[in-house]
Amino acid sequence: MMTIKKVPTVVSLNQEEDQPAGCGRRCLNTCCTIGARMPLYAYAKRPCTKPERIQSYTELDGGGFQPGFLGATTSYASYDDLLSIRESLSSSDDDSLSSGGASDIHDDDAFSLRKHITSEWEKKFQEGLFRYDVTACESKVIDGPLGFIAQLNEGRHSKKRPTEFRVDKVLQEFDGSKFNFTKVGQNEMLFRFEEGKDEESRFYEAAVVEESPSIMAINVSPIDYGHVLLVPRVLDKIPQRMDEASLLMALRLASEVNDPAFRIGYNSLGAFATINHLHFQAYFLDLPFAIERAAWRDVAVSTNDCKVGELTDYPVKTMVFQAGSSLEQMASAAAAACCKLQEENIPFNMFIVDRGMRLFLIPQRYAERQAKGEISQELLDTQVNPAVFEISGHIVCKRREDYDNATEAWTWRLLEAVSLNDEGFDVVRTICVEALAASAEAIEMGRRGAGVKVKAEFESDAPGAWVDFAAVKGGVVQPALQLA
């Protein structure tokens, strides 16, 4: 068994050792939830399709980083500053997805999920539920073409004794004796987030809980403004493993928030998840992440324009999924790829951007290399854990010296230690192409590979041509028929 020593991130106040457990404290377990009335955001039941334009930061800044963009080189002064910036960006609230914009049960004002999350998060801050004030943390953009972001967050560092975490097994059984989200207090919960029965999204101030709820809660050790957790079907006690329904829920959350500053992340076991209870993390950041700005190339595309690609100039080898006319197909393909990675015991991270229309799938081996003693002491001393947000370009530094001296070369060296080698990544590319083909197969009534074309970039007689998908051998796409 392969393990590393790591201090678990404290995401809930009830995770602390001196907190009481069990009933009598309004927890999120069955005893205190079933039959209770809780706020509910019921998102539209109809399929969510691609908006007319993806409002990504790559588009907002013209595809190139601009010094001082959205106050990039300064720490945030206040919540009001952040909200005013977001208001200037999000005039697109009326430019909603075809699923129908969010609507309140009240007739007076249109309901904005984005505004509701931020206002409720701030209320929790005023109630003193966070372990530190994240808005007081210094933040800067590191000089360089990708614009990595560094944050000095000494409050996130814990003096608790490191715990042994197994890092050689992505799929592990749920263990109710360890901390899980049923032990979170309802005072840390924001609202339920579940599929509704109507074709319009609606918010209810109090709705009776009849079955296992999916909940949004604060992360009491936030990385940035509005840091929240999405826990699908909390009472089902699902271990930290990806499935299609949960991924689609996360994508719908991104589309309903409808703000390009809101990104969602996922860490598998072995890729710096420290809680084996299914959850996603998300927060607002009014800056482009480096991974969003990295160049990428198409590898495969379906007839409804769902694409699979890969980054071409980034320190961590990464696959990209981009939705076409169907968010559901992207969810199906990406979830199938994740399930295969889990079966093959390949740890991974996932980063959801562009209001849910694009995601990055990032296989990694950092923890395994750490357990084998293959990571340099220089990198270990930084105490930077390369989880999803760090890999995507938001480096949380726990030491002043690392923050002050951070360069793009240093960041690149840190993240390169995460990446798979070429041979390992070839396997992941194969998995992703086959997952897209399988999702298209379902749409095209069972015809193998129907509706999917791949780039024959490895074929000397047809470099760069699009060809029909037939098979993948040894990580190299082998075309069956070259298209005219």
Image (cartoon, helix red, strand yellow):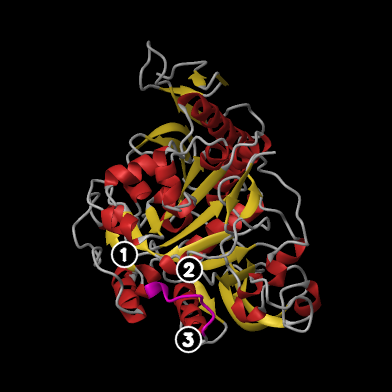
**Marks 3 and 1 in Cβ contact (< 8 Å):** no
Q: Residues within 10 Å of mark 1 (few under 14, many from 20)?
A: many
Query: Callout 3, which amino acid?
Result: Gln
Q: CA distance from mark 3 to mark 1?
A: 22 Å
Q: Earlier in the sequence, mark 2 or mark 1?
A: 1
Q: Which residue is mark 2?
A: 222
Where are the magenta residues, as a range?
128-135
* In the displayed structure image, the side of residue 432 where residue 76 appears, left or right: left
Taking 472 as reference, is 6 above or below it?
A: below
Taking 9 as reference, is 36 above or below it?
A: below
Query: Callout 2, which amino acid?
Result: Pro
Q: Secondary structure at mark 3?
A: helix
Residue 231's image quarter? bottom right
Q: Which residue is mark 3?
A: 126
Image coordinates of residue 27 in percent, x first then y, are: 72, 77
Image coordinates of residue 105 in percent, x first then y, are: 57, 83
Picture disc at residue 65: none
Q: Which residue is mark 1?
A: 139
